Amino acid sequence: MLQATYDRLMRAAAHRRANYWLALISFIESSVFPIPPDTMLIPMVLADRNNAWKAAGICTIASVLGGLAGYAIGALLYDTVGLPLLEFYGYAEKFASFTAQYNEWGAWIVFGAGITPFPYKVITIASGVTHLDLLIFVVASVLARGLRFYLVAAICWRFGPAVQNTIEKNLGLWTTAGFLLLVGGFALLKYLG
């Protein structure tokens, strides 16, 4: 099953509309969607290494625009949309204590969430709810998301065949490790909160 999914992603990554799908996934991941755009970016770069920088740019721009949508959800729709999303992801109670110091550390919080597996959508919504300065939010988002996506693209571009061979030979292991990191990240957040 994993191999079939991987093969499907590789075919989709080489499709002529792959950039549009990458932009859509990057946009919605920053405000509501739980699957990171790396799942599309990596196969796209492996399928066409000449497209690495364009794909990273698309990912970055669409992610920041999606982050602005998340910011708008927090600023304009917190009670009707933002709070239910935070409750869905299990962050509603912790969010109340989180907002007090948020603006003091806002730029670093946005930057940290933008480069790590932490659910970026939580931070985009939080930034809107707390009315973090919009310029600070955008600059931190561009720097963090750009760093993340260009680094992923650079690794895949530089080590393309080796990365592809490693992924294909150890697909189950990589999937399990990714899942464990995701679950571990959420567990750590619950523990710290």
Image: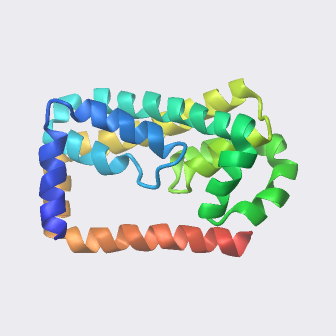
Instruction: Give residue 56's position: percent from left, percent from top.
Output: 35, 33
The answer to whether one can see residue 130 in this image is yes
Q: Looking at the picture, does residue 62 appear above or below residue 188?
A: above
Q: Is 45 on the left or on the right of 112, as rendered?
A: left
Q: Is 25 on the left or on the right of 70, as rendered?
A: left
Q: Split into 4 quadrants, where in the image is the N terminus?
A: bottom left
The answer to whether one can see residue 109 in this image is no
Instruction: Give residue 128's position: percent from left, percent from top.
Output: 72, 38
Q: Looking at the picture, does residue 174 appear above or below residue 34?
A: below
Q: Split into 4 quadrants, where in the image is the C terminus?
A: bottom right
Query: Residue placed at 41% from the left, 39% from the top?
Result: 26
Q: Looking at the picture, does residue 32 appear above or below residue 173?
A: above
Query: Residue placed at 70% from the left, 40% from the top?
Result: 77
Splitting the image into 4 quarters, where does residue 57 fall?
top left
Query: Residue placed at 82% from the left, 41% from the top?
Result: 103
Instruction: Give residue 81's position: percent from left, percent from top.
Output: 65, 47
Splitting the image into 4 quarters, where does residue 62 fall?
top left
Which color scheme does this rendered protein use?
rainbow
Q: Is 188 on the left or on the right of 147, as rendered?
A: right
> Is 121 or 140 nearer to us in this picture?
121
> Is 73 or 101 nearer to us in this picture?
73
Label count reads 0
Residue sitting at the far right: 100
Residue sitting at the far front: 80
Splitting the image into 4 quarters, where does residue 67 fall?
top right
Query: Residue placed at 55% from the left, 43% from the top?
Result: 31
Instruction: Give residue 144's position: percent from left, percent from top.
Output: 54, 38
